Amino acid sequence: MSEKLWGGRFSLGTDELVEEFNASIDVDKRLYTSDIEGSIAHVKMMANESIILQDEAKTLIFGLEEVRKKIENNEITFSASLEDIHMHIEDALGKVVGDVGKKLHTGRSRNDQVALDVRIYLKKETRIIIDLLTGFQKSLVRMAQNHQDVIMPGYTHLQRAQPVLFSHHMMAYYEMFKRDIDRFEDCFKRIDVMPLGAAALAGTTYPLNREFTRQVLSFAKVSDNSIDSVSDRDFVMEFISHASIAMIHFSRLSEEMVLWSSSEFSFISISDAFTTGSSIMPQKKNPDVAELVRGKTGRVLGNLITILTLMKSLPLAYNKDMQEDKEPLFDTVDTLKICTDVYTRMFGNITIHKDRMYAACTKGFLNATDLADYLVSKGMTFRKAHSISGKAVALCLDQGKELNDMTIEEFKTLSELIEKDVYGFIEIDKMISRRISYGGTGYDNVRKAVLKAAGELGLK
Ligand code: ARG
């Protein structure tokens, strides 16, 4: 049984099972770089404020760098008896520099230390995630550019509704991910707050210069209340909420990828490199990537529930429950990163079947609204026109045909206002051109939207 860094008031060693239960090292070891970065800043500040000697600071910084190397070279054995990454690093530091290592923890508690480490870690990861999401937006815009005028059925209730440009559909996802990026940027401001110096919860008696530490670590501001500094995990809850919404966006896209690549739709083919076969059915080519991303959304939503439940009803300030915040956070970061990455790659490997998309627009009365619009253009009220167009659909259903197969005589039985120019009016291409309201699927609108997005992303 090793002696604990907090062992002073204890006469019995920790129960072995409790030791294992209490430890978080398996999870929080990935915070080692953040922990060392935070400790070096703390040392520099203490030397600057003459809380420790300059020489001692030099030794401590050298020692911490040595510990970093040892961890990277797998020279440190992680063990439950040292609980967490903070204790492991302090212990390893002592082995490198001797007794002076014991000065590192002056004016600091693991409570503010862990809050700092998670914030350092999450600032980096948030930037990476924003970059990855921006990369995926580029794939969406490229896809829109490469298939600018391809027409597909737009759906409501998964029923064919009205023709839209495929590029417009892609740009809908561009907007969704743009909001995700905005949310992460906004949340970044609340991650970017430096909590060190709060100590256990009440602040400390040492003359710490928190502003100095903030500058060394490049944080935007210092936290204002020591109790809040160690008990706040809002930024974790916020981050996972935003990640959940981003995953939901990927999951909705995945559902479309799965549907569109089915024989029933055949709107797209996903390259062999991004699909897999079946061990029994030789003909199968499965959209596993899309399916897995859809499935992994569940993990992230689960992580959100975990962190929310964890924080609910926790009294101030630090509680050990909060040690459980890291697993859902790390899993969320890992999942969102790999899903974004794999999607970006897959998107460059999708073939669009524009003929199939177009053909799907010719069946299912996607021009029924436009027939009503036609009657409105001839002076009828929209409600009346809607009803007449509905009757035309009923007539066609009866005869197993589409609206443009109706004879002019048949149209005339429904309304005298209908003339031969109706056929041109309800052509698919015309329906797109007429959708000129801002944000609609009209050719010019979409071209402008794609151009604007390409500009925002620095694409040509
Ligand atoms: N491993 C702990 C955590 O992640 C560090 C803080 C422990 N603080 C304490 N007072 N036991 O939350």
Image (tube, grey):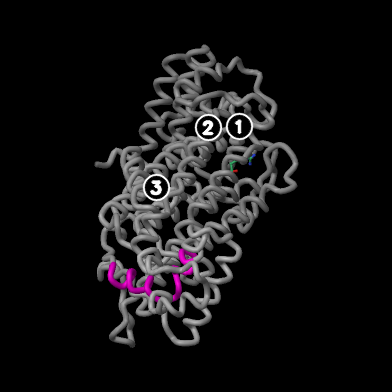
In which quarter of the view is residue 409 placed? Answer: bottom left
Residue type at mark 1? Ser
Task: Write down the residue under mark 2.
Answer: 189
Measured along the vertical axis of the image, is residue 76 above or below residue 383?
Answer: above
Contact check, label 2 and label 1, Cβ < 8 Å? no
Residue type at mark 3? Leu
Q: Residue at x 55, y 71 (%)?
A: 388
Ligand 1 within 8 A of label 1's CB?
A: yes
Q: Does the segment drawn in magenta span residue 364?
A: yes
Task: Write down the residue under mark 1.
Answer: 109
Give the mark toward the camera: 3 or 2.
Answer: 3
Residue 435 location in percent, x, y?
42, 54
Which comes sooner in the sequence, label 3 or label 1? Answer: 1
Is residue 81 in sight in this rendering?
no
Return the residue nearer the eye: 243 or 47: 243
On residue 133, the disc is 3
Ligand 1 in which quarter: top right
Q: What secondary structure predominates along the stretch shown in magenta?
A: helix
Which comes sooner in the sequence, label 3 or label 2? Answer: 3
Measure the C-alpha gap from mark 3 to mark 2.
Answer: 18 Å
Q: Residue at x 73, y 38 (%)?
A: 316
| Secondary structure found at label 1 | loop
Return the residue nearer the eye: 234 or 250: 250
| Secondary structure found at label 2 | helix
Give the magenta range.
Answer: 353-371
| Residue 429 as seen in the image, left or right of residue 382 | left
Return the residue nearer the eye: 188 or 78: 188
Which quadrant, please, contains the C terminus? top left
Which comes sooner in the sequence, label 2 or label 1? Answer: 1
